[in-house]
Image: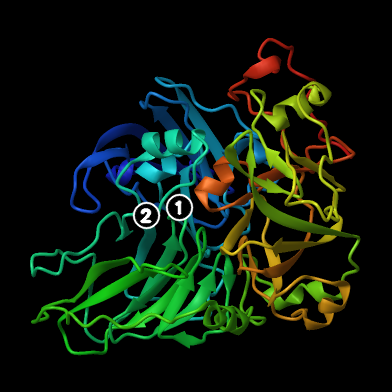
Amino acid sequence: MSSVMYMLLLCLSAGVISVVQGEDPYLYFTWNVTYGTISPLGVPQQGILINGQFPGPNINSTSNNNIVLNVFNNLDEPLLFTWSGVQQRKNSWQDGTLGTMCPIPPGQNYTYRFQVKDQIGSYFYYPITAMHRASGGFGGLRINSRLLIPVPYADPEDDYTVLIGDWYAKGHTALKKHLDSGRSMARPDGVIINGKSAKGDGKDEPLFTMKPGKTYKYRICNVGLKNSLNFRIQGHPMKLVEMEGSHTVQNTYESLDVHVGQCFSVLVTADKDPKDYYMVASTRFTKKVLTGKGIMRYENGNGPASPELPEAPVGWAWSLNQFRSFRWNLTASAARPNPQGSYHYGKINITRTMKIVNSAIKVDGKLRYAINGVSHVDPETPLKLAEYYGVADKVFKYDTIQDDPPATVEDKVTLAPNVVNQTFRNFVEIIFENHEKSIQSWNLDGYSFFAVAIEPGRWAPEKRKNYNLLDGVSRHTIQVFPKSWAAIMLTFDNAGMWNVRSEQSERRYLGQQFYVSILSPARSLRDEYNLPDNALVCGIVKDLPKPPPYSAGA
């Protein structure tokens, strides 16, 4: 390859090598995943570290970058990482869920290869196996806009990742054992910001430093297990500019409700007295409010943060109204040069409506969570591998749930792999209906969807008149308030096997998830990549001959 087509850049910091080829750059990472001692709440406990770090290292990429990430699993359990919000176009092989990949066995390694294609925004990664997320292994993942594509705000002085979440002192092994015994997880023990919580004793080191008069970008993600959190900064309003891959109308907020799995990007200007200020994250919709703090320090500032913390809002009506204030910025460029608003989702005919009802029920005395009466169980053979090798009928049945769930959905439950067959390129409406008293948070892999409505009560077709069919934000996670419903719309144009799951770890682990299978009729590389050469194989396909690859034609 000529020197014009090939340039090698070595960046020794953060364990990354960047190789720029003629078309799109490659970023190389090596991760050593181990146990180590951490003290997020001031008490030592076992944590999951990546290259010795908790939280894990930031992945800092740019639209169309190719990520090559070699994970060495030095834990004593199988491990998989998922890349929450990364769409993995044509490439569910790298999505990192148990329905698409065999987990990495202890003492072995696997190299993920994927492209962050046609995306911008703030995301995070985490271990999806067992309850590993409860002990760490999570970190920020940002996809920057290419230099040729303008963003609708001036370049900030710096760009910071803020990972907030509830935290349990017990760790992943004890929590998994607790859930396996059939019991629900208790309340968390605290809330942390970037792996710690400030004590307020004057000895806290700052999480972030700001120069007076400058504006900074903060990417705030709720990486916790259970609770929605309200995030705010003493004396500093936040201008919302991006949400899970979409530029938003730039409203200003004193605080933001960030539900589990969600990410927001805000601009904050250092225009107050130069001293310390607290950033605060506290639980929402809980009887006992847990609060985590972190120090934001002005450069050359003088003075501690005030012990008086800004108050959080009360009740979920406030949160619902905040959701309704979020709007897609129709004039901003997307990851491509065309404006976000050039895609008129509200004018597309709906070809299918699915209603998803979550429920909690005891099965043989043990707690399970279900969707339309089915509680998902991961088979030994990943669903996508079974499909690819032509043995799906030996592993799972398609469409065990109905589009319109039975009225008795809360009365009985079936334990089985839960896979829905979806027609390639259909435009679909999905209703998440929550009959329970607790808030839900749903994530869809492989896509972003238009969040068109959240309302109290039960959904009915006439509710469509209240949909936002113009500028609903395109995102990948949506909350559903108690005794309420949420509606999303999307085109299923990304062939593969994609996970729809509760982002609340207890619910996901105990069955509140399903997979959507979108098969390309052409079996063409235009629509989907082949099984990677280095793919781990397990279950009943382990010794089967590899199927013929997809063709390049059609």
Residue position for label 2: 188
**Do the numbered discs 2 and 1 sit on residues whose CB atoms are within 8 Å?**
yes
Say which residue appears at 47% left-offset and 56% top-offset.
226
Q: How many marks?
A: 2
Q: Dot 2: within a 10 Å radius of its alpha carbon, few (fewer than 14), some, or many (20 or more) residues?
A: some
Farthest-out residue, top: 543
Residue 523, by quadrant, is top right
The residue lying at 41 percent from left, 68 percent from top is 287
In the image, what residue type sits under mark 1? Leu
**Nearest to the observer: residue 434 or residue 63:** 434
Q: Residue at x 35, y 33 (%)?
A: 33
Name the residue: 47% across, 22% down. Answer: 105
Separation of residues labelled 2 and 1 (CA atoms):
9 Å
| Location of the C terminus (image quadrant) | top right
- Between circles 2 and 1, the one closer to the viewer is 2
Give the structural element (helix, strand or loop) at label 2. Answer: loop
Up/down of 116 relative to 105, above or below:
below
Q: Position of residue 347 (x, y in %)?
A: 86, 75
Res. 188 visible in picture:
yes
Note whether 61 is above or below 289 in the view shown.
Answer: above
Mark 1, Cα crowd under 10 Å, few <14 / some 14-19 / many 20+, is many
Residue 106 image-quadrant placement: top left
Of callouts 2 and 1, the N-terminal one: 2
Q: Secondary structure at mark 1?
A: loop
- The label on residue 225 is 1
